[in-house]
Image: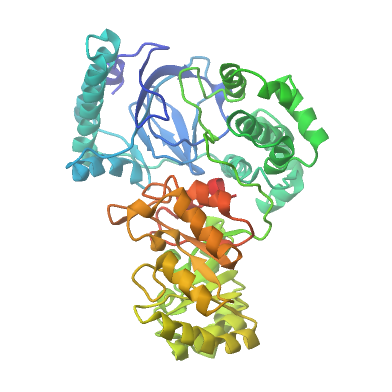
């Protein structure tokens, strides 16, 4: 294996680039080295795919908080928005590695199935490929062909590089069935906890973060946490929190028109004086001086706070905000949640445990769909309700079909479980009969302290936006739980102006958002389908606190989708 990987062409500092990371087609192959002092740089993610190939015997990767040991020749596949970072052993010699960043806005027409096989490499639970020498040699040969095409730069070299890169990916797909990677014993528990704590800071930087509170959350003493954190990360807990916040502030100052006092609030600083003092300590200039710099000079300052990033590597975490306006943080009532049935729990206690492990704050629950022992709300036993109540679950919404007896039973359950909203998904009945049902239920809901809401959907009695508008005319007090994807008759409606109209019309009546995405009629991760460009704009339209629910039953992508929701909507 050592001789084989030594046959791989490598030139320190060499790179091959096609376009930049915001282009529809983007490719960057970076040949470089990293050393132990670069350990525990901030975890990051980006909007493109990444392939990481280590050329040394001992390294590691942290992927969504999971420690994965690597050896020479291992290939790591990182999909967009996957939180990760490299970890290098304590050695004097630098570690060689190849990083390939790429993106392609569309699959090759007529070859969606074949393109899907390539993307499937990035969807594995453990996205690492370790091939026996016989098969790795084939991949190495293709990578060497790519290197030579980028080095020669003959006429039409860009097309040659792209074709060589596709052949490299194809070789990986053909041999992926021979994967022999197995997880190895991870570092001691203290190390893993520190990794988890840095991940928590990177995703909760906008909140109040104290050493004592974090120590309590992760079951460590404050003194021990402080000592271990400085030992492993190379800086104190406080300095790390400040660095994460300043990195976000730099991005907002550089890529948005946000006002300084909004940036202070969005980045978790307690006051303008604290922000200015911290900013000057890290950047050696004031925020206003930074904003007056040229874009190239600003990029140099941003790069200086991320030792993982070289001059040729595109901006990583946090991603550039481009032209999308950032919504002001500060809606204290916003909670991120999931459909309870996606957690596949057999009991209320197990449901609560899985909620805690995922770090979600609330649930949307259709009790008969979540628990096989319950056939309908009308057959829901007092024992089952007591079990659910005893679990102290935070449930924001109960779903129910538009049947009067079912709805009344669901309202009773919501009252016992202290659920604020019962959401009714209309069927294809007439709008007038559906409105009559809602009016009939209003009195019972009000007496129980529960609010009724409607989920508009194309093809139902409340047919998309037009149906919602008609329902408002018939019932001036009606509330809505919106799944933006269900409002679309076709993809042509998926425009910012369409959703501006939605929120202009429904405004304060929207009590929750159900978030899902699709591509070619198939469910995909949030931000990977037809709603990819629209969800950030919808986030800017929200004007009040509400639960944000991931409306998907796919369990494997829950962590990625929650991270996406936190980044886009909070």
Q: Is there any visible trace of residue 14 in the rendered image?
A: yes
Coordinates of residue 337 in the picture (x, y in percent): 53, 61
**On screen, 108 above or below 143?**
below
Residue sitting at x 36%, y 73%: 460
Coordinates of residue 521 in the picture (x, y in percent): 28, 56
Q: Which quarter of the rendered picture does the N terminus lie within?
A: top left
Coordinates of residue 145 in the picture (x, y in percent): 22, 17
Residue sitting at x 72%, y 45%: 209
Instruction: Determine whether, in the image, residue 104 is placed left or right of residue 513.
Output: left
Q: Is there any visible trace of residue 383 in the rendered image?
A: no
**On screen, 359 above or below 376?**
above
**On screen, 503 above or below 131?**
below
- Residue sitting nearer the eye, 143 or 228: 143
Instruction: Determine whether, in the image, residue 428 is placed left or right of residue 310.
Output: left
Coordinates of residue 20 in the picture (x, y in percent): 41, 24
Residue sitting at x 47%, y 68%: 340
- Residue sitting nearer the eye, 94 or 562: 562
Question: How was this image coloured?
Answer: rainbow
Picture mark count? 0
Residue sitting at x 67%, y 36%: 245
**On screen, 484 above or below 366?**
above
């Amino acid at each position: 294996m050592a001789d084989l990987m030594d046959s791989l062409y490598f030139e320190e500092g060499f790179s091959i680039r096609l376009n930049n990371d915001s282009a529809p087609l983007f490719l960057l192959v970076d040949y470089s080295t990293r050393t132990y002092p670069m350990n525990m740089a901030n975890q990051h993610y980006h909007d493109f795919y990444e392939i990481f190939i280590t050329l040394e015997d001992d390294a590691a990767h942290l992927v969504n908080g999971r420690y994965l040991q690597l050896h020479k020749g291992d290939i790591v596949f990182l999909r967009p928005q996957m939180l990760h970072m490299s970890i290098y052993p304590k050695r004097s010699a630098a570690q060689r590695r190849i990083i390939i960043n790429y993106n392609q806005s569309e699959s090759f027409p007529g070859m969606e199935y074949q393109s899907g096989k390539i993307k499937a490499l990035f969807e594995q639970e453990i996205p690492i490929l370790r091939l026996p020498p016989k098969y790795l040699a084939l991949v190495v040969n293709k990578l060497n062909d790519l290197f030579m095409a980028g080095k020669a730069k003959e006429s039409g070299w860009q097309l040659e590089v792209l074709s060589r890169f596709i052949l490299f990916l194809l070789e990986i797909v053909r041999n992926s069935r021979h994967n022999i990677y197995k997880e190895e014993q991870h570092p001691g528990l203290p190390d893993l906890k520190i990794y988890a704590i840095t991940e928590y800071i990177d995703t909760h930087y906008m909140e109040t973060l104290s050493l004592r509170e974090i120590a309590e959350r992760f079951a460590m003493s404050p003194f021990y946490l402080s000592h271990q954190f400085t030992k492993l990360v190379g800086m104190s807990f406080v300095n790390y929190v400040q660095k994460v916040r300043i990195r976000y502030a730099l991005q907002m100052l550089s890529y948005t028109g946000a006002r300084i006092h909004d940036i202070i609030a969005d980045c978790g600083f307690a006051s303008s004086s604290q922000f200015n003092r911290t900013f000057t300590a890290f950047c050696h200039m004031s925020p206003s001086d930074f904003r007056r710099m040229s874009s190239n000079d600003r990029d140099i300052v941003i790069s200086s706070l991320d030792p993982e990033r070289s001059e040729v590597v595109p901006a990583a975490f946090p991603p550039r905000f481009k032209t999308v306006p950032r919504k002001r943080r500060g809606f204290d009532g916003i909670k991120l949640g999931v459909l309870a049935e996606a957690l596949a729990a057999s009991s209320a206690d197990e449901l609560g445990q899985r909620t805690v492990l995922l770090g979600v704050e609330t649930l949307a629950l259709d009790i008969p769909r979540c628990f096989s022992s319950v056939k309908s709300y009308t057959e829901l036993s007092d024992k089952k309700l007591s079990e659910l109540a005893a679990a102290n679950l935070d449930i924001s919404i109960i779903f129910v079909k538009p049947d009067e007896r079912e709805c009344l039973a669901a309202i009773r359950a919501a009252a016992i479980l202290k659920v604020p909203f019962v959401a009714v998904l209309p069927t294809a009945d007439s709008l007038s009969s559906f409105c009559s049902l809602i009016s009939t239920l209003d009195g019972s809901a009000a007496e129980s302290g529960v609010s009724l809401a409607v989920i508009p959907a194309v093809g139902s009695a409340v047919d998309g936006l037009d149906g919602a508008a008609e329902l408002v005319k018939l019932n001036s007090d009606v509330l809505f739980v919106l799944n933006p994807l269900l409002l679309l008759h076709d993809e042509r409606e998926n425009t910012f102006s369409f959703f501006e109209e939605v929120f202009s019309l429904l405004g304060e009546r929207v009590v929750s958002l159900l978030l899902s995405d699709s591509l070619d009629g198939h469910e995909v991760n949030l931000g990977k389908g037809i709603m990819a460009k629209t969800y950030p704009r919808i986030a800017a339209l929200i004007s009040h606190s509400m639960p944000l629910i991931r409306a998907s039953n796919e369990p494997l992508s829950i962590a990625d989708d929650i991270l996406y929701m936190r980044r886009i909507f909070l």
